[in-house]
Amino acid sequence: MAFWLFKSEPNTWGWDDQVAKGDAGEEWDGVRNYQARNFMREMQLGDRGFFYHSLKEKSVVGIVEICATAHPDSKTDDPRWECVDIKAVRPFAKPVSLDEIKSNPALSEMVLVRNSRLSVQPVSDAEWQEVCRMGQTKDD
DNA sequence: GCCAACGTTGGC
DNA sequence: GCCAACGTTGGC
C-alpha cells in the first residue's frame, strides 16, 4: 500500500466537508498541476492519505482512503485533468502542525517541507508512521 | 498583505 | 525550443 498527502484550503474544502460525504467519498477535483495529477494516476484502491489544511491551520488533521482510482475530472471538459475519489477514515486525535513536522528531523525530507506548493504528494512509509504517531492516531 | 517559489504561457 | 512575463500558491 502507498501513502499520500492531500492539501486543501479549509475554507474551500475542509475535513468537515469530507466527513459529511461519508463512505461514498468525493472527487478530489480541481487539481490543475501535472505532477499532482500523475501522483493521482498512481493511486490504488485502499491507499491511505493524510488530509492537510493549509493557510491558517497548516496541520494534518485526518486520514483518508482512496475509494476510486483516477478518472476524468467532472468539473472540467479538459481531458488532461483527472482525479481520484477519497473518503474520510478518521480524524487525528491531535492535529500535527507544519511547525512540528519541520522541527522533526525524521520528517525533513517530506515533500510538504521541500515543496510546500504541491497539492498532492507522496508520503514514505516511515513518514506515514511518524506522523500518525505524532497525531496519536492508529492507522488500521 | 507581502513576497518567494514555482508552474505555465506565449512571443520570438 | 528558449526564456521572459505572468499568475498562483502558501508560508510568514
Image: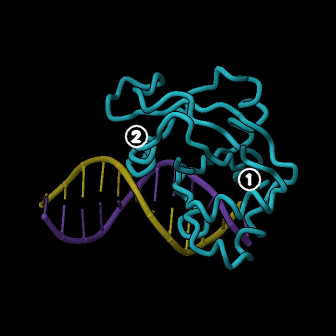
Chain colours: A cyan, B yellow, C purple
- C10 over A84 or under it: above or below: below
Q: Which mark is residue A2?
A: none
Residue A41 picture location, percent across and down: 40, 40
- Outermost residue on the right side: it is A93
Residue neighbourhood size for the residue with mark 2, other residues' Cα within 10 Å, grouped as few (<14), some (14–19), many (≥20): some
- A67 over A95 or under it: above or below: above
Are labels 2 and 1 on one chain? Answer: yes
- A35 over C11 or under it: above or below: above
For residue A66, what is the image quadrant?
Answer: top right
Quadrant position of the C terminus of chain A in the picture? top right
Q: Nearer the viewer, residue A41 or A59?
A: A41
Residue A125 picture location, percent across and down: 58, 60
Q: Say which chain tag 2 marks.
A: A
Amino acid of disc 2 = Arg
Residue neighbourhood size for the residue with mark 1, other residues' Cα within 10 Å, grouped as few (<14), some (14–19), many (≥20): many
Q: Report the Cα–Cα distance between label 2 and label 1.
A: 23 Å
Residue B12 picture location, percent across and down: 12, 61
Disc 2: which residue: A41
- A53 over A111 or under it: above or below: above
Judging from the image, what secondary structure is the residue with disc 2 in?
helix
Disc 1: which residue: A60
Q: Nearer the viewer, residue A111 or A91?
A: A91
Q: Say which chain tag 1 marks.
A: A
Residue A80 lies left or right of residue A112; in this view the side is left
